[in-house]
Image (cartoon, rainbow, N blue to C red):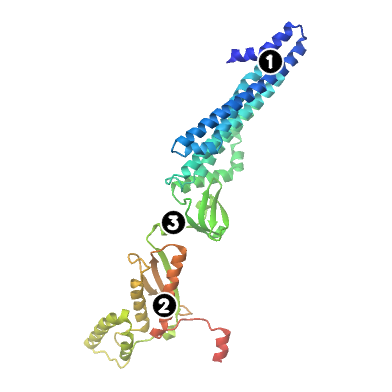
Amino acid sequence: MLKFTEKLFGWCYKLLMKLDFNETIAAYLSLVVNIAILCFIAYSVYVVFRFILVTIMAIVAKKTKTRFDDLLVSNQTAKYISHLIPLVFIYKSVPIILKHFIYWEGIFGRLVAVYIILLVLWIIRSILNALRDHLKNIQEYSDKPIDSYVQVIMIVLWILGVVVIVAKIFDINTDTLVKTLGAVSAVLILIFRDTILGFVASVQVSVNDMVRIGDWITMDKFGADGDVIEINLATVKVRNFDNTTTTIPTYSLISDSFRNWRGMINSDGRRIKRHVLIKTSSIRFIQEEDLEGFKKIQLLKTYIEKKQSDINKHNQMHAIDKSIPINGRNLTNFGLFRKYLTKYLENYPGLNKDMTLLCRHLQPTAHGIPLEIYAFSTDKRFVNHEYIMSDIFDHIIASVSYFNLEIFEIPSNKNAVSEA
């Protein structure tokens, strides 16, 4: 190869010297001719190899089942490689063409070398991008932060590339340059602080499986409430449910608290946890004569009969004076209402009966006693879940009056005037 190159670019100078041209004039004329030859050959090599590589890769991509080669084509890997081949030829030819121009040989040789290094980095980048896109289409890796790993690899390669380029341009020994960079590593750490923190966070997020692409997360600090659409080295992008996009620093996922709803989505139900406030003054004991009216409620009939029998036996056994309702055991309208709602929930078709299902009252407040429903809907989709919850509470609110209970609400100005 070297002998062929010497013959290709050396004949003109020798010919001009034989024709008794001045040495300087012969050098400049041969330089012009050699540059023209070099440009023609380099362009021809580029066109030929570009056609061959692009065509072959396109044919292979169509023939094979894997999508990786298709992604190499879409990322123009073959095109970048076809640029590299003539550049290598130019790099080898520069010392021969500029043999009589030592100063310019050093400059152009270094510039071509820098271009080759940059092109190699660009080729590696296109391959890594194709690999990233390929892995994202595989179910096993679709929720992994592949972008972060690609960015980390490229950052390391760019740092190495810059080191080599600086060493090449200023003719510095690479080992000496690396040692110098080590001495200023503290400054570099400050410069790349966010990148380093992002890398550490990406690794921890991936290893601990904290967040995946497609997860629904809520992070109040950044106003994020939606699905994760991208995880890279510096940021995590969340598409909110109002179709806006929130960008969160990756490091915030390990330094701040956030809520990941993946567990709920992967579970067998979505939680319903809501309450109504019952007026404390409306709660009372149920008189014997009132029980017949409550027995007409089908879900309570069997329960009331059994409970009434147990209470009567207990009160008779202990000779309880029932002239005052507070004595002995008694049923309350609030207790019957809770039992009714429990039976109602057990018969409601939209709830998962294998998960926690209860109706309870919480700590009394100044606004009444919170009566809370705690259950899980089988349908976890947002719209359907809200419909199920609304349907249940529609029934609860409409049922309150049948138990002589009242729901607390702050009187409006209109009600206050009418009462006055």
The answer to which of 49 and 322 lies nearer the viewer is 49
Q: Amino acid at mark 2?
A: Ile
Q: Amino acid at mark 1?
A: Lys
Question: Quick check: 120 above or below 385?
Answer: above
Residue 262 numbered mark, or none? 3
| Spot occupied by residue 215 in the image (x, y as percentages of width and height) | 47, 54
Q: Which residue is mark 2?
A: 396
The answer to which of marks 2 and 1 sits earlier in the sequence is 1
Q: Please give the name of the residue rendered at 62% of the width and 26% of the height, measured from the top-left corner.
A: 113
Q: Amino acid at mark 3?
A: Arg
The local crowd at label 2, few if under 14, some if 14 to 19, many if 20 or more residues have their Cα within 10 Å, is some
The answer to which of marks 3 and 2 sits earlier in the sequence is 3
Q: Estimate the spatial distance between the alpha carbons at disc 3 and disc 1, rounded to whole Å.
A: 67 Å
| Spot occupied by residue 171 in the image (x, y as percentages of width and height) | 65, 24
Q: Estimate the spatial distance between the alpha carbons at disc 2 and disc 1, rounded to whole Å.
A: 95 Å
Asked if the residues shown at circle 3 and circle 2 are in contact, with their CB atoms under 8 angstroms apart, the answer is: no
Q: Choose top left, top right, bottom left or bottom right for residue 75.
A: top right
Indicate left or right for 355 with 5 as reference: left
